[in-house]
Amino acid sequence: MPVTILIGAQWGDEGKGRVVDWMASSADIVARFAGGDNAGHTVALDKDVYKLHHIPSGILHENVVSIMGNGMVVNPVNLLREMDLLREQGVEIRPERLILSSRAHIITPAHIALDEAREVSLGDAKIGTTLRGIGPAYLDKTGRSGIRTGDMLLDIETFAERLTDGIEAANEVLAQQGMETLNPAEAAESYLEAALKLRPFIKDASTYLYQALRAGKNVICEGAQGTLLDIDHGSYPYVTSSSPTAGGALTGLGIGPLFVERVLGVAKAFSTRVGGGPMPTELDGTVAQHLRGSGANFWDEFGTTTGRPRRCGWLDIVMLRYGVSVNGLSELMLTKMDVLSGLDELKLAVAYEIDGERSEYPPVTNEQLDRAVPIYECLSGWREDISGCRSFDELPAAARRYIARVSELCEIPINTVSVGPEREQLVANVVKQV
Ligand code: IMP
């Protein structure tokens, strides 16, 4: 059973890219199963920083095959740009190493325009999307009018016709909302060029994966976004339009559950969120600034895809417990522990008080969640710089206590913690000692 599913256990940006990169040295295949270029996975390696939006983080390992699965939505023009940027950084991109499922869906220029139009029309109630056209692309998928990546293998005139039909339909909606319409032929042009270049990468990824799994290959399913942004399990409607949870890995790649061995959750040692929607432990003031960083470093809390400052707050155990249950996590990894250094006191939201009642799981409605007051447990902080620690024993006692308490409250082993952005800045084998 060689499949490991790796899931963001919070609102995304947990540092999944760096974890996948670390684990990929023992993998044969790394596969993305949901989302599109709304994701921004950053991997730091020997002073180089790689920013991945569609392409799995496994691409940085020579012997790994990277797959973009059927559950994804793909912008062909942006994907080509991403490939070119990686090539400029010395990464080899060829069809033997990178597979694009023929059953993924295409994000068209119409989807991007519609994403913006919808956000404008929502006013203050906007979702705060990444404006990459994600929602409208999934809407067309479920409405059975989407264009699939496999359609790029059709004769180019037929593909062009599908694209322009979609753009003309979107124009009607844009015009109704007083938004600028698109010139169908012009908007489609760069897509046709991209389609021709992407053709060699398009394959039946599910069959490829099945054969690889039967042959005993190790597969890591790389989650994008996070559990609390899941279309079913997140704080709807303030969610993305895909299934970034463990179940999404199976449908988004076309693999069966009996192959799955581990479901690993990645959680930041504190909470962040981008975009709108409830976030009970959100802070402002000096602690939030401490957690967010100044923006001078790529690992500070500013969106990789949009550059937006992220909302920051204390670690929300109520939400994390929910992430553990919804995904059936077998273990947890805590990232960015080093960021907590220098805070005298740390808080964990162990429960919520809602209308006078204590709750250890998130409430049913967003309205109740808006009224939730976190019940905090306070722990001592530490002042030491822990970025050089490589073993559990080297961590200050307060950091060890923090990890142990999170593990206890979530009733899950914590295997590994990260103490910096570089590949080797990890403390592994924590579970044996907590
Ligand atoms: P969309 O996925 O662009 O439609 O955005 C929907 C919501 O998900 C917004 O709140 C975004 O900020 C959030 N979101 C989408 N992708 C990411 C991500 O990779 N990290 C964090 N938040 C994300």
Image (spheres, rainbow, N blue to C red):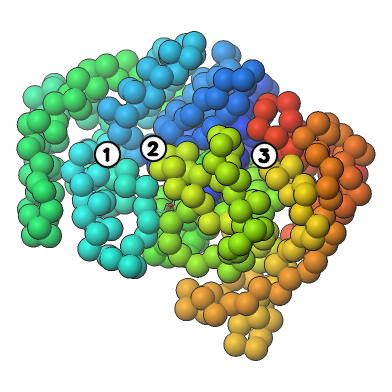
Looking at this rendering, what residue extends furthest in the bottom direction? 356
Which is more toward the observer, 34 or 176? 176
Question: Does dot 3 land on a helix, a strand or a loop?
Answer: strand
Which is more toward the observer, 212 or 405? 405
* N-terminal label among 1 and 3: 1
- Label 2 residue near ligand 1, CB within 8 Å: no
Examine the image and state in which quarter residue 11 appears.
bottom right
* N-terminal label among 1 and 2: 2
Examine the image and state in which quarter residue 177 appears.
bottom left
Figure label count: 3
Whether the residues at callouts 1 and 2 have beta carbons within 8 Å, the answer is yes
Q: Mark 3 points at which residue?
A: 261
- Label 3 residue near ligand 1, CB within 8 Å: no
What number is the disc on residue 252? none
Q: Mark 1 points at which residue?
A: 107
Q: Position of residue 382 (x, y in %)?
A: 84, 50
* N-terminal label among 2 and 3: 2
Name which residue type carries label 1: Ile
Q: Mark 2 points at which residue?
A: 37
Name which residue type carries label 2: Asp
- Label 1 residue near ligand 1, CB within 8 Å: no
Q: How far apart are marks 1 and 2 (CA)?
A: 10 Å
